[in-house]
Amino acid sequence: MANFEADANLEIERRFSSDVGGYHGQAKAQPAEQALNEIQIQHKISRELISREISRRNEMKKMGIDPKDEEVKGDRKKMDREEARKEVEMDEHLVEVNVLYQRYDSEPNRGITEDSVERRQAEDGLNKLTPPAKTPWWLLFLKEMTNAFALLLWTGALLCFIAYALDTDSVENVYLGIVLAIVNFLTGCFSYYQNARSSAAMEALQSMSADTATVLRDGQLKKIDSTQLCRGDIVKITAGEKVPADVRILKSVNFKVEQSSLTGEPDE
């Protein structure tokens, strides 16, 4: 469709320029004739576009697809893409500090109140990223039982049982198949147990090394888990501490930030 429109536009420009300029002294075309030619070309373009759209809709109907549903899906996908591309609109770094205090019901010498913490967290959520989805334990166990080496052992055990079925006199095939199946099963259980212990140890280590933040609430400085921060909290950060959230600097003394994790270059 796009190529057809482009060719038609080139044809209009060619005809228009030839009619206006003439050829080596030929009489120039009348404006009415030029307009008529353009209308005829545009009419042909419209008929071709309509014909292609009708053909496309007929093909979709033959395939059992409702063209209206397809258009709705296309619009939804477009809206989802535009929604995902939208940036979070923040003006906390632009407005006056007094405006921030009023917006978040906070005071410079008091901070926020403990009574409002639960309400704020219910509205905005905790100060942490959404954790990735965890794989169910049964799926992890199934992966241990169906890796490449495990599948090789399962195949060997199955072949042993098939060999015994074909020749019942060879009892050693049954014993071999049972041994392979038991060894494979126990190996998978041991691997799953080891991986589960490692994951539990990592989670325990992360919980022990959780970041904390010093906030001003009800006029008193308190140390809390950084995930419990709320909008409107006044945070006190000392040398060596991590910035626990997106904050605006209200007051600083000899302030310096380590930016190597952001820029990739060592700070001098």
Image (cartoon, helix red, strand yellow):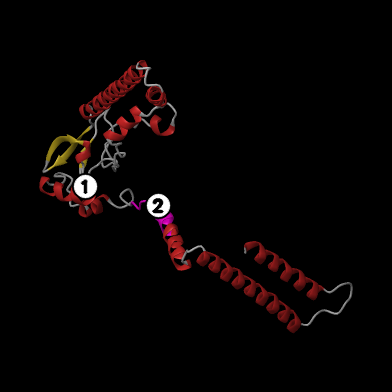
Q: With respect to residue 3, does 174 lie above or below? A: above
Q: Let me know if residue 256 appears in the view.
A: no
Q: Quadrant of residue 6?
A: bottom right
Residue at screen point 35% across, 53% down: 89
Q: Is residue 150 left or right of residue 234?
A: right
Amino acid under label 2?
A: Ala
As drawn, which residue projects farthest toward the top? 172
Q: With respect to residue 142, does 194 lie above or below? A: above
- Between the C-alphas of marks 2 and 1, the distance is 27 Å
Q: Is residue 34 left or right of residue 140?
A: right
- Magenta stretch contains residue 177: no
Q: Quadrant of residue 224?
A: top left
Instruction: Tell which tag, 2 or 1, sits nearer the viewer.
Output: 2
The residue wearing badge 1 is: 232
Residue at screen point 26% across, 42% down: 250
Give the total of numbered labels. Answer: 2
User: Which of pointers 2 and 1 lies earlier in the amino acid sequence?
Assistant: 2
Element type at mark 1: loop
Q: Is residue 85 left or right of residue 121?
A: right
Element type at mark 2: helix
Image quarter (top left, top right, bottom left or bottom right) of the N terminus: bottom right
Q: Which residues are magenta?
A: 79-90
Residue 84 marker: 2
Give how far across and how far down residue 48 sits, in percent: 64, 71
Q: With respect to residue 88, does 129 lie above or below? A: above
Query: Within 10 Å of the Cα at label 1, are there few (<14), some (14-19), or many (20+) other Cα atoms?
Result: many
Residue at screen point 70% across, 75% down: 41
Give how far across and how far down residue 60 sits, in percent: 52, 64
Give how far across and how far down residue 17 sits, in percent: 77, 71
The residue lying toward the viewer, choosing from 120 and 47, is 47
